[in-house]
Amino acid sequence: MIERRFAPYLLLLMLGAGWGLTQPMTKIAVSTGFRPFGLIVWQLTISALVLGGLMLATGRRPPQTLRGWRMCAVIALVGTVIPNSASYLAARHLPSGILSIMLSMVPMLAFPLALAMGNDRFAPLRLLGLVCGLGGVALIALPGSSLPQPGMAAWLPVALIGPAFYAVEANVVATWGTGGNDPIQLLFGASLVGLVFAVPMALASGQWIDPSPPWGAPVHALMVSATVSPLVYAGYVWLIGKAGSVFAAQVSYLVTGTGVLWAMAILGERYSGWVWAAMALMLAGLALVRPREAEPPAGACETARPGGPLA
């Protein structure tokens, strides 16, 4: 009985740790010069294989309607190709832990979009949460001693492109739905459509990555990230069904926290007091912007993928 009571919390911790692990894996993947479009091609390929296996195992079918495939195309662009391109570029110049902290901005950036699109109602505490998030970014960007190299601050706007597009993605889903797809079908279809965009771009830009062995650490890191992401997303969807969306949304705190801890353990990163203060401020903002059980769910908070690159 006790084990069953704590099972959702254990799963929540595992999901957060899994998503947090993808951030240092991204840092390793770009460490030897692999460029964004080439990485996205193989990320989408591995994700499509993993999600396809999940669909076969659960008896799901690919999207069946034009409307469903249109939504897959939208998610492929605003949820994968564009934000992941920016995230891979930022990962070449910023510490992995900083990228994990930036990801906590997703629900905070989604809130003003939700207001503009009519998906949520104004709440002073949520506005305060957005202010806290922006204050956290300022604590990283403005003090000269906050980052290992002062020039890194110029890449923070690039690091925010990913969270901004994940916020757009959340509100698109909240407004127009998933095109009749369940979340696994949607991400599977988005992976396939994303390849239609990413393969030509990788070839045309000279960013194609030859998958032939021997594989070094960057390829192995990409394989880990691309395999873990859809698996933890499937677990996240299952947890929403069992424990509710507000409970499952708490994984965002764990993604940020474990992402920083993974970066310290795997990459040896260390951070200034300014960065730790920024992290505390952004987690406070995340707590303020989250919807409560009694409130109608904010599309931004309930549908946003908490961990960054997934599909």
Image (tube, rainbow, N blue to C red):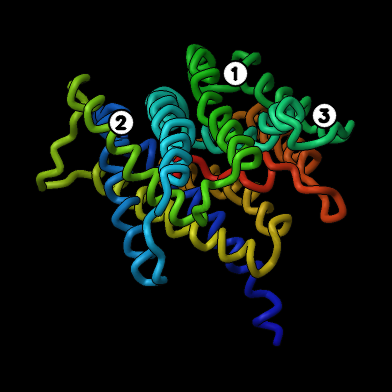
Sort mark 1 into few (<14), some (14-19) or many (20+) by Cα contacts within 10 Å.
some
Spot the residue most to the bottom.
Answer: 1
Picture quadrant of residue 146: top right
Q: CA distance from mark 1 to mark 2?
A: 40 Å
Task: Choose mark 1 or mark 3, whichever is in front.
Answer: 3
Q: Name the element at disc 3.
A: helix
Task: Choose mark 2 or mark 3, whichever is in front.
Answer: 2
Evaluate whether residue 101 shows in this view.
no
Picture residue at 30% right of the left edge, 31% below the top: 197
Residue 117 badge: none
> Callout 3, which amino acid?
Leu
> Callout 1, which amino acid?
Ser
The residue carrying mark 1 is 145
Sort mark 3 into few (<14), some (14-19) or many (20+) by Cα contacts within 10 Å.
some
Picture residue at 25% right of the left edge, 25% below the top: 201
Q: Nearer the viewer, residue 184 or 106?
A: 184
The residue carrying mark 3 is 127
Q: Nearer the viewer, residue 58 or 289?
A: 58
The residue carrying mark 2 is 197
Task: Choose mark 1 or mark 2, whichever is in front.
Answer: 2
